[in-house]
C-alpha cells in the first residue's frame, strides 16, 4: 500500500502535468500570430501526448472534444456572442481552436482518471 503523502504527491503531479500543457497552449495564442503554425504546434502537443501514454479511450475524448465544443463555438459566433480576430477563420472560428478544445478534453480525462485512482 502506498503512503498517503506519496499518493497525494502523485495525484497532484499528474494533475499538474495535465493542466500545464493546456496553460502553455493558451499562452501561445497571442505569441504565435500565424494560425497554421499554431495549429502545427497544437498538433505536436497532441501527438506527443498520445505517444507518451497510449490509451484508446484518449482518442474518443480527443474526438468528442474537437467536435462538440467546436459546434458550440460556431453557434456563439453565428449569434454574435463571440468573435475572433485571427487570420484564418473557418465558420468564424480560428482553425486551431478545435485542436485546443480536443486537447483540453483529453487532459481533463487524464486528470479525472488520476483523481479516481486516488479516491478509491
Image: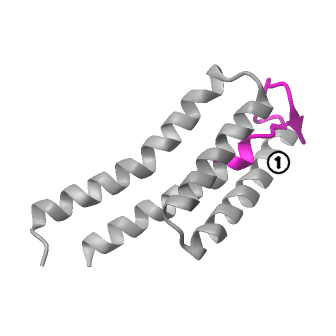
| Magenta region | 80-100
Q: Residue at x 33, y 66 (%)?
A: 115
Say how many tags the image has.
Answer: 1
Q: Nearer the viewer, residue 55 or 27?
A: 55
Residue 33 lies in quadrant: top right
Q: Residue at x 78, y 43 (%)?
A: 76
Q: Nearer the viewer, residue 97 or 6?
A: 6
What residue would you read off at disc 1? 75
Residue 57 in the image, given as x and y percentages of width and height: 58, 74
From this view, report whether residue 61 is shown above or below residue 95: below
Secondary structure type for disc 1: helix
Tell whether position 18 is magenta.
no
- Image quadrant occupied by the C terminus: bottom left
Residue 95 in the image, given as x and y percentages of width and height: 80, 40
Residue 53 in the image, given as x and y percentages of width and height: 49, 64
From this view, report whether residue 60 is shown above or below residue 35: below
Q: Is residue 83 among the parts visible in the rendering?
A: no
Q: Is residue 117 among the parts visible in the rendering?
A: yes
Residue 118 lies in quadrant: bottom left
Q: How is the image coloured?
A: one colour
Q: Residue at x 67, y 23 (%)?
A: 32
Residue 78 in the image, given as x and y percentages of width and height: 87, 41
Tell whether position 83 is magenta.
yes
**Does residue 68 appear to the left or right of 118 in the view shown?**
right
Badge 1, how many Cα within 10 Å: few under 14, some, many 20+? some
Amino acid at each position: 500500500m502506498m503512503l498517503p503523502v506519496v499518493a497525494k504527491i502523485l495525484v497532484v503531479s499528474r494533475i499538474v502535468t495535465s493542466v500545464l500543457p493546456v496553460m502553455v497552449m493558451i499562452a501561445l495564442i497571442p505569441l504565435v500570430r500565424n494560425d497554421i503554425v499554431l495549429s502545427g504546434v497544437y498538433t505536436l502537443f497532441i501527438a506527443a501526448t498520445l505517444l507518451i501514454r497510449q490509451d484508446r479511450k484518449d482518442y474518443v475524448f480527443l474526438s468528442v472534444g474537437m467536435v462538440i465544443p467546436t459546434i458550440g463555438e460556431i453557434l456563439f459566433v453565428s449569434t454574435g456572442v463571440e468573435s475572433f480576430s485571427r487570420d484564418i477563420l473557418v465558420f468564424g472560428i480560428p482553425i486551431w481552436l478545435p485542436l485546443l478544445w480536443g486537447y483540453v478534453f483529453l487532459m481533463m480525462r487524464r486528470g479525472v482518471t488520476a483523481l479516481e485512482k486516488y479516491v478509491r
